[in-house]
Image (spheres, grey):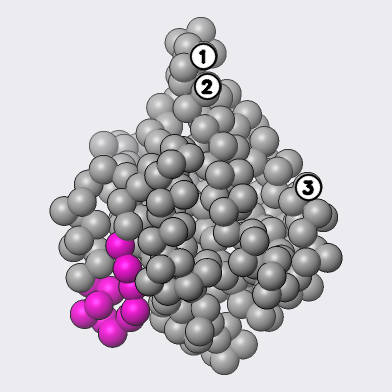
Amino acid sequence: MSSLFDLSGRTALVTGSTRGLGRAMAFSLAQCGARVVLNYANDRARGLACHDSFKEAGHEAMLVGASVIDQDDVDRLVAEVESEFGGIDILVVNATPQQPQNPIESYDWEFHQQMIDYFLKSPYLLARRVLPHMKQQRWGRIINIGSEVLARGIGNFSPYVAAKGAQNGWTRSMATELAPHGVTVNMISPGWIPVERHAGASQSKIDSYQSRVPAGRMGVPEDLAGSVAFLASESSGFVTGQNIHVNGGLTTF
């Protein structure tokens, strides 16, 4: 990676980072020189395998199992990182639950609450713990992982779209609040990038989506590497409150 994206000496926490997009983003930050904290909620075996792969690649990483929608778990997670690596300089809020698409009548409030917990409660719980360190050193990066669904207004997806809208609003408000402290807050909104949890998607569904992408292909997890490295780096210090769509031009604003 270019020295413009040099993260040597920085500690980055990427939630939900032992597979899929989270793993790719965590690996990108490690390639830029950051100490990376890998996080999982349930699958310890997968977490250990992911951690081993980072170490084998020569990257400095630690693995912490914790639910990022539980305050006690978040407090423990951050405390463990502080004990091992010091304060967290870069926070990437990526962890997500399953996202079934259904008509509004098929959802109950419990499902809506789960979306709110992951996309509003989790960023709040994490930020309140990492911000004292960021403010003290007058440098920090918070990167929320959003989705193109908000800009596209995808139907049969209302709880997820609504929660992503709230996360986007939180990002913009926090960007204004934290800019005087040297902390930037931005969002990356991927298009549909098939990963492990999309294993059951039909080829016809993939082809239908791809046919609408101006770039003419499906995204891959590594397509997020440059965006997250930029927003985590010194080079993005004057960029805050922004939402970068990574979807091959499917949204162009």
Q: Nearer the viewer, residue 198 or 202?
A: 198
User: Tags 1 and 2 in contact by the CB under 8 Å rule?
Assistant: yes
Q: CA distance from mark 1 to mark 2?
A: 5 Å
Q: In this view of the protein, can residue 132 be seen by the observer?
A: yes
> Between residues 99 and 215, which one lies in front from this camera angle?
99
Q: Which residues are magenta?
A: 53-63
The type of residue carrying mark 1 is: Trp
Residue of label 1: 109
Who comes first in sequence, dot 3 or dot 2?
2
**Vertical side of 191 occupied by 120: above or below:** above
Does 41 sit left or right of 28 as displayed? left
Q: Secondary structure at mark 2?
A: helix
Disc 3 residue type?
A: Ser
Tag 1 secondary structure: helix
Look at 56% across and 30% down and name the residue there: 116
Q: Position of residue 57 (x, y in %)?
A: 26, 81
